Image (tube, grey):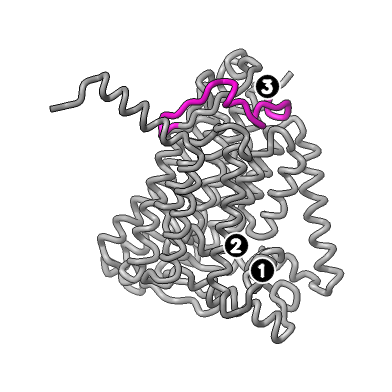
């Protein structure tokens, strides 16, 4: 017997009341991180291997042998990435893995506090629940890479854009010098905000300061080696472009196979045309980003409000950097959280743009990524057909997500000007998928600030 409408309404009301509890949200935060921590330490597939082996090795070199990657040699990461790796030695090398996981949990706690408004009321709790669901679906990789440091920093940064754009830029610029991807959000800020000149100046100043410090301690041009280290890479197994060669290998195309590259410590493919495709990926990414930029500039000229443009443009830039990339590491999925959180927080009932579609897609992408990595990764490397289907589905969905963002940007650039500008009012955050809506007074937040209001 199905429940009556009144009973369903009471059940929905009680569920909503429970999910609006900050205590429950923070309790779930702890449980999710404990679960992911246990998976990192004990799950099959060595999900924490990069941290416990590679990162620790780099810090051993620095502390024991006084040999610093990024200073005494070229390095695949920007130089500030060494700092969180060193911080994980705070309680000794024997506790390196546990300290790393605790550090990431602390950073994520700061990010969640930023999402829900630092304890001021109960706003954005639904977005906090979305993020916890994303972390749980993504699995241990959500905590087990250097990207896990940059994501909470980026989340803190995007929550400050409206009220403190320059401080937000500092946070995002520092994150960029740990892993490059937050530069995509800075680029979106420069295009979307009226304070674009100040944002650009702050980003340049932070970068110049970091470069000056590295030069002063003898790093030389190694400070830029993270750029050149990427140019010679082949096609990584998980990258969307690589999917075609994986299926060719299954089909028995001669000289097409998966191999392990000892120099950069990753699995790649060889086959006819791989070298050409690898060489073309970076120029292709540049062209795609340029095309997105042109559409965004048209939207700005059309008078589109930053509240509409910034989240969508951030998502387009970040997704393009994942989809049009010869490196497809599973941790790249973590990048998508920041622009989606920004989009959910700035969406409102009065706005034409809802971030429900990307929110759903990103959750599905996270779940599919955990299927692929780390537990069944060996099946993928052995070209198991079922795993190739899962990976192919995930990679196709990346382009669906990119397509959604580009289509929305195009519509903004073509909308009648009076529709694009809209009214200047506070924003009520859409906290779907949990269906929680705060009152206007509770929902107003740092996002209701001049930096993101409509052009005058």
Q: In this view, does 382 lie to the left or right of 268?
A: left
Q: Which of marks 2 and 1 is nearer the N terminus?
A: 1
Q: From which residue to which does the magenta span run?
A: 432-453
In whole angstroms, how far apart are the C-alphas of marks 3 and 1?
Answer: 42 Å
Q: Which of marks 3 and 2 is nearer the N terminus?
A: 2
Disc 3 target residue:
454
Q: Position of residue 354 (x, y in %)?
A: 48, 28
Per the image, label 1 sits on a secondary structure element best described as helix
Q: Can residue 413 be seen in this view?
A: no
Residue pushed farthest left?
A: 1
Instruction: Classify 389 as above or below 68.
Output: above
Q: Where is residue 310 in the image (x, y as percent from the top left)?
A: 62, 34
The answer to whether residue 412 is above or below residue 381 is: above
* Residue shown at 49% from the left, 76% from the top: 261
Residue 233, horizontal then vertical, whole percent: 55, 68
Quarter of the image for residue 85 reads bottom right
Label 2 secondary element: helix
Q: In this view, does 357 lie above or below 237?
A: above
> Does the magenta segment cover residue 433?
yes
Asked if labels 2 and 3 touch by Cβ distance under 8 angstroms, the answer is no
Q: Name the residue under label 1.
A: 87
Classed neighbour count for the residue bearing mark 3: other residues with Cα under 10 Å, few (<14), some (14–19), many (≥20): many
* Residue with the mark numbered 2: 103
CB within 8 Å, label 2 to label 1: yes
């Amino acid at each position: 017997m199905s429940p009556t409408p009144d009973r369903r309404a009471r059940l929905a009301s009680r569920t909503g009341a429970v999910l609006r509890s900050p205590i429950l949200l923070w309790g779930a935060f702890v449980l999710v991180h404990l679960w992911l921590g246990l998976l990192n330490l004990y799950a099959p597939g060595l999900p924490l291997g990069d941290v416990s082996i590679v990162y620790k090795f780099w810090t051993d070199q620095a502390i024991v042998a006084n040999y610093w990657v990024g200073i005494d040699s070229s390095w695949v990461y920007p130089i500030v990435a060494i700092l969180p790796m060193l911080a994980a030695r705070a309680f000794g090398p024997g506790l390196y893995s546990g300290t790393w996981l605790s550090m990431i949990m602390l950073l994520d706690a700061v990010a969640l506090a930023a999402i829900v408004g630092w304890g001021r009321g109960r706003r954005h709790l639904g977005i906090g629940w979305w993020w916890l669901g994303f972390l749980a679906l993504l699995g241990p990789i959500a905590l087990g890479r250097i990207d896990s440091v940059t994501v909470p920093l980026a989340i803190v940064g995007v929550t400050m854009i409206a009220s403190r754009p320059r401080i937000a830029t500092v946070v995002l610029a520092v994150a960029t010098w740990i892993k490059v991807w937050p530069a995509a959000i800075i680029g979106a800020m420069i295009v979307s905000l009226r304070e674009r000149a100040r944002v650009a100046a702050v980003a340049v100043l932070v970068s110049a300061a970091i470069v000056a410090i590295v030069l002063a301690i003898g790093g030389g041009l190694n400070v830029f080696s993270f750029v050149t280290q990427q140019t010679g890479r082949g096609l990584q197994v998980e990258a969307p472009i690589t999917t075609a060669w994986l299926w060719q290998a299954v089909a028995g195309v001669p000289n097409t196979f998966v191999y392990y590259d000892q120099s950069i410590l990753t699995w790649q493919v060889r086959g006819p045309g791989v070298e050409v495709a690898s060489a073309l990926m970076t120029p292709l990414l540049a062209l795609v980003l340029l095309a997105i930029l042109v559409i965004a500039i048209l939207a700005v000229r059309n008078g589109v409000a930053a509240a509409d443009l910034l989240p969508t443009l951030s998502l387009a830039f970040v997704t393009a950097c994942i989809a049009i990339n010869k490196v497809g590491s599973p941790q790249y999925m973590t990048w998508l959280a920041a622009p989606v959180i920004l989009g959910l927080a700035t969406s409102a009932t009065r706005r034409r743009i809802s971030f429900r579609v990307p929110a759903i897609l990103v959750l599905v992408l996270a779940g599919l990524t955990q299927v692929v990595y780390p537990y069944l990764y060996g099946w993928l490397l052995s070209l198991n057909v079922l795993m190739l289907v899962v990976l192919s589905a995930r990679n196709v969905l990346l382009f669906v997500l990119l397509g959604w963002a580009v289509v929305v940007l195009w519509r903004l650039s073509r909308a009648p000007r009076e529709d694009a500008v809209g009214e200047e009012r506070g924003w009520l955050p859409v906290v779907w998928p949990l269906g929680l809506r705060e009152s206007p007074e509770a929902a107003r937040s740092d996002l209701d600030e001049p930096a993101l209001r409509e052009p005058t």
